[in-house]
Amino acid sequence: MVESSLNRSLTSLRIRKALSNPVFALRNLKFNWVRKTSTANHVFVVGPPRSGTTLMVSMLKAHSNLAGIDGETCFFFRRNFTDIKYPEIDDQTMKKLIASATDMVDLFDMIASEVVTAQNASRFVEKTPEHALRLNFLLKRFPKAKIVFMIRDVRDGYLSALRNPKVKVNTVSLYGEIWKLSVRAYLKATQKERVKLIRYEELCSNPEIVMTEVMSFLDESLQITQLASNSYSKTKMRSVIGHQRLNEKISNQTVGQWREKMSNQDVEIFNTIAGEELQKMGYSLV
């Protein structure tokens, strides 16, 4: 099981960290010993890297009811919860939240509440692609939350990753493995009714239709500002290398680019690594 294997790996990392630095371990013990089940109706945006998660969260945050933190939190993969800093929350407030939280779920809810209140919204939206690998954890600990799972042809996603120096999975085999693990996590999700699968290709081709479906899934109404590039591009991510297309109108110009730009050798490697998952997700191998 992907989730079980991942949890074992995380536990092993934390044990090694604890043995090398017991003070560090004690400070983080309460966060890693999860007891709380959240009652908040957060929105999580997950998926393989370069699958449109940034575009999706930017369009969601253009809605008046939704607020979030710029960038990725990687919150549920953190090893140290005592040094969290977000520009949306001042340092003194963050220290108080960290001190009073009972575990990582409680701390996440507190941070979400601060951001939502400050931005005069009613709901928190968080984007971290890698949280796809903790899908069942999110579904279990946040039973009222909804998850938007972005998916993109692994071959187009890889070509996009090559243009972004911040994406570390920049080899064919590594990107293929991460994509495959993310897809397997989706396929093994225990509560599919709370997970909305969105294809990047469809979002780029029919943004209004797709976003109407997404907002309906979230029990919200689509706002016209969500479709206007001068609105969703206000995110600070638009100036980050690899995300400049947020400044442009949504288009499908990069869909299927792998057919012209990818070598036959790389195509075969992806077919070998993730061919089964590609077909399960509706993508052709040729």
Image: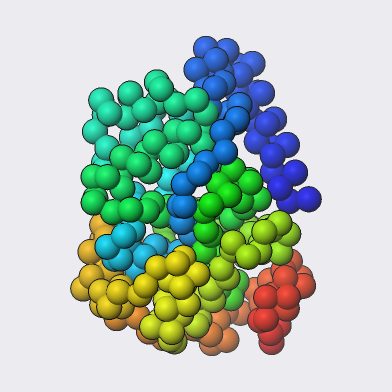
Residue at image coords 66%, 81%? 283
Q: Is residue 50 visible?
A: no
User: Horizontal and vertical percent for residue 238?
Assistant: 28, 63
Q: Is residue 47 left or right of residue 67?
A: right
When asked about the image quadrant of residue 107, the answer is top left
User: Horizontal and vertical percent for residue 144?
Assistant: 53, 52
When asked about the image quadrant of residue 239, the answer is bottom left
Q: State whether residue 130 is above or below residue 244.
A: above
Q: Is residue 277 left or right of residue 258?
A: right
Residue at image coords 24%, 33%? 90
Residue at image coords 65%, 23%? 16
When asked about the image quadrant of residue 203, the answer is bottom left
Q: Is residue 224 left or right of residue 23?
A: left
- Please state which of residues 245 and 280 is positioned toward the viewer in this rendering: 280
Q: Is residue 25 visible?
A: yes
Q: By what rule are the colours in the image chosen?
A: rainbow
User: Horizontal and vertical percent for residue 252?
Assistant: 43, 85
User: Horizontal and vertical percent for residue 95?
Assistant: 33, 24
Q: State whether residue 254 is above or below residue 165.
A: below
- Please state which of residues 50 and 172 is positioned toward the viewer in this rendering: 50
- Please state which of residues 60 and 157 is positioned toward the viewer in this rendering: 60
Q: State whether residue 244 is above or below residue 133.
A: below
Name the quadrant of the C terminus.
bottom right
Q: State whether residue 110 is above or below residue 242.
A: above
